[in-house]
Structures are given as C-alpha cells and as structure tokens.
Image: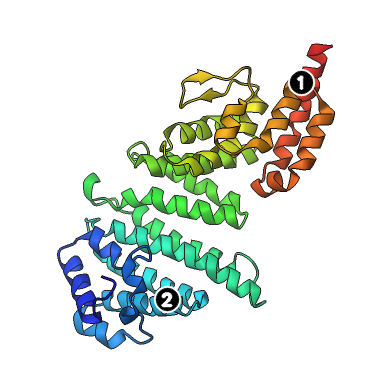
C-alpha cells in the first residue's frame, strides 16, 4: 500500500464502494492507514484522475482526501482541515443517499475523527499566525459533525440492524471532546438527552459507552452533581480495558476527588479489595502515577488543613490543568470535619 500507484489506489476505492465494504473504504480515507505516507498519492490536483474512476460524490470526496495528504505532507494543517471539510460534506451527500443501509458507518467514523484532529491542528497553526482565536476551527468542525449526527438520529425508516442510529454515540463522543476543549459544556446537554432516550444506549460498544460515561461524569462533577459523577466515572473505570493504563489514569483524575467528596470507600476493581476508609491507597496512586493526590488524601484523613493547603499549592499547576483545583478546595470542609472528629 505504501508504494501503489494512484490508479491502483482508486481501483481499490471503487471496489470497496461497489461491494459496500465499509471497513476497507474507511481505511482508504483514514489518516491512520499507511497509504497517506505514499508520495505517489500526495497530489495537489487529483480531480481528473478521480473523475475517471469514481462516481459523484465519491470522486470529490477522494480527490479532497488526496489533496489532504498533499497538505499534510507539507505540514499545512490549515489546508488539510479545509480538504477534510470537503471530504465530510461529500461523504454526507453519499451517506444520505444510502437509504435503509448503514454499511458506510466505518467511513463516517474515519472522516469524523480526522476532521476533529485536523481542526485542532489548524487552530494551533492559525493562533500562532495570529489569524484566529483558540477554538474557531474546532467550533466549525463541531457544526459539521452535528450535521452527521442529525443524519444518523433522523434515520427512522431502516430496521435496527441497518440503522444509521448506530453512529450516534461515536459522533456524540467526538463532539464532547470538542466542547470540553473549547469550554462549551452546555452544548453537551441535548446530546446527553438524545443518547439517554435512545433504545440503543445499552447496545453500543463498550469502548464507546466508556467514553460517553467518562465525559458525562466529568460534566456532572463540574455541575456539582457528585452522585451522578461517581456513578458514571465508576462505570467508565470499571469497564475500561485492563490494558488502557493511560485511560484509566485519566478517569481516576476525576473519580478520586469525587469519591473523596462523597466520603465513600474507593473500590480497587483490579484486586477486588477495598481501601481503608474513603481514601485511595498509596498502591493505587503509585500504579497510575497519581502521587500528586498522596499528600491531599493524607491531609484530609488526618484533618490537617495546613498540609492540605501545602499539597494544593505544591501541585497547583497539575490540578488546574486537569480542571479539578476548585473541586479539591471543597475538601477543606471534610478536612475540618475530620479534625473535629479527632478533637
């Protein structure tokens, strides 16, 4: 694949579309696939070649993809993002024309993911050039992803197996990632309602449900709904794949403060044992490289307000970056309570 010609590539695209092979078609338009590094496919003007092999709107879609590989090869993420928007727009026209079938869902996943990533990269380049403020491209990408979401959500004609509604949760998770990045959490609310009212909500893949619960749990935490935050973040941690150490660590960054605030016991799911009281064990913190919490938990347990203030100051940058500094400050009340228990 790394050295195929443009004609061979387009023939593979044609066959994938003709046989409704969504997985193969998705690979051929994804930046996770090695074909994007092939210099033979990095073309500034591939339109004529694409028109000779592919029908509209696929000719426009894959021409934009080849232009996108050219832009990425030149490290021009602003142009790459423009090309990716054309890819998604062209795909949407084709997707809507697929009545009562959903074979192209893997293609949607691939182009939607790349759209968000290129929007983020384009944002960074534009901000460096002083041509845009942070989040502008991500906001535009979110509008396009919402168009995809509406197509999936409005598919009421197809049977459950062929329904485009299977694509809803993936898109919601991509939108969550954008809204959290640009700090527009209020836009999550209608998406949460849409998934909660869906008859597929318990049938999506575990990975997608874990991501959804993680973001909804974080939003609940920021809304001071700590009970719901604990429920959703616990689900995410418990069902996150054992080998996903990085993801489990991310979940714990928010689950730990919530557990401490609720004054509950923290279950160590891997071992099936309970830590003492409501505080995480040193073993847990060490395992997930979260020793920033060690002095915090010690201070709260001992009712030592001075130590808590010192711990919050010492790791202030980390806690602020994670967006949990103000949440951790609420632990002062529990620290006082523990102090008076001792007295």
Quadrant assignment for the N terminus: bottom left
- Closer mark to the observer between disc 2 and disc 1: 1
Distance between the alpha carbons at the discs numbered 2 and 1 = 57 Å
Residue 3 image-quadrant placement: bottom left
| Dot 1 alpha-carbon crowd within 10 angstroms: few under 14, some 14 to 19, many 20 or more | some
Closer to the camera, 198 or 8? 8
> Residue at (23%, 75%) from the top-left corner?
9
Residue 284 higher or lower than 173, as above or below: above
Q: Which residue is mark 2?
A: 83
> Residue at (60%, 38%) from the top-left corner?
254
Q: Which residue is mark 1?
A: 302
The answer to whether any part of residue 90 appears in the image is no
The percent position of residue 288, horizontal first and vertical second, equals: 55, 37
Give whichever of discs 2 and 1 has the lower sequence position: 2
Residue 124 image-quadrant placement: bottom right
The answer to whether any part of residue 117 appears in the image is yes
The percent position of residue 204, horizontal first and vertical second, equals: 34, 42
The percent position of residue 274, horizontal first and vertical second, equals: 54, 18
Residue 184 image-quadrant placement: bottom right
Task: Name the side, left or right, on which 208 lies relative to 99.
Answer: right
Residue 140 higher or lower than 183, as above or below: below
Task: Kindly identify which numbered label has been placed on residue 11.
Answer: none
Residue 229 higher or lower than 136, as above or below: above
Residue 51 higher or lower than 249, as above or below: below
SS of the residue at dot 2?
helix
Closer to the camera, 266 or 231? 266
The percent position of residue 146, horizontal first and vertical second, equals: 45, 59
Task: Name the side, left or right, on which 50 lies relative to 148.
Answer: left
> Residue at (47%, 26%) from the top-left corner?
269
């Amino acid at each position: 694949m790394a050295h195929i010609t443009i004609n061979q590539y387009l023939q593979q695209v044609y066959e994938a579309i003709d046989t409704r092979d969504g997985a193969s078609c998705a690979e051929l338009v994804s930046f996770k696939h090695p074909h994007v590094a092939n210099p033979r496919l990095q073309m500034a003007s591939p339109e004529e070649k694409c028109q000779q092999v592919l029908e509209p709107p696929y000719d426009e879609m894959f021409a934009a993809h080849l232009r996108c590989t050219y832009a990425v090869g030149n490290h021009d993420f602003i142009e790459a993002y423009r090309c990716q928007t054309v890819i998604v727009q062209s795909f949407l026209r084709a997707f809507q024309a697929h009545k009562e079938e959903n074979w192209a869902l893997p293609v949607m996943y691939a182009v939607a993911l790349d759209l968000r990533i290129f929007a983020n990269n384009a944002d960074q380049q534009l901000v460096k050039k002083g041509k845009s403020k942070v989040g502008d491209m991500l906001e535009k990408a979110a509008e396009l992803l919402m168009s995809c979401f509406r197509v999936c959500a409005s598919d009421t004609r197809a049977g459950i197996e062929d329904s485009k509604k299977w694509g809803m949760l993936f898109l919601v998770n991509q939108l969550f990632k954008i809204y959290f990045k640009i700090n527009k959490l209020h836009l999550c609310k209608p998406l949460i309602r849409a998934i909660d009212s869906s008859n597929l909500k318990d049938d999506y893949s575990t990975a997608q449900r874990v991501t959804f619960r993680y973001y909804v749990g974080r939003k609940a935490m920021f809304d001071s709904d700590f009970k719901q935050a604990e429920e959703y973040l616990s689900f995410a941690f418990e069902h996150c794949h054992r080998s996903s150490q990085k993801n489990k660590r991310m979940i714990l960054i928010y689950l730990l403060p919530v557990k401490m605030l609720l004054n509950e016991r923290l279950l160590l799911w891997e071992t099936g044992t309970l830590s003492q009281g409501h505080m995480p064990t040193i073993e847990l913190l060490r395992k997930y490289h979260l020793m920033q919490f060690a002095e915090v938990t010690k201070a709260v347990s001992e009712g030592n307000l001075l130590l808590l203030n010192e711990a919050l100051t010492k790791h202030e940058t980390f806690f602020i970056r994670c967006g949990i500094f103000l949440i951790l400050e609420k632990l002062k009340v529990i620290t006082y309570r523990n102090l008076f228990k001792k007295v």
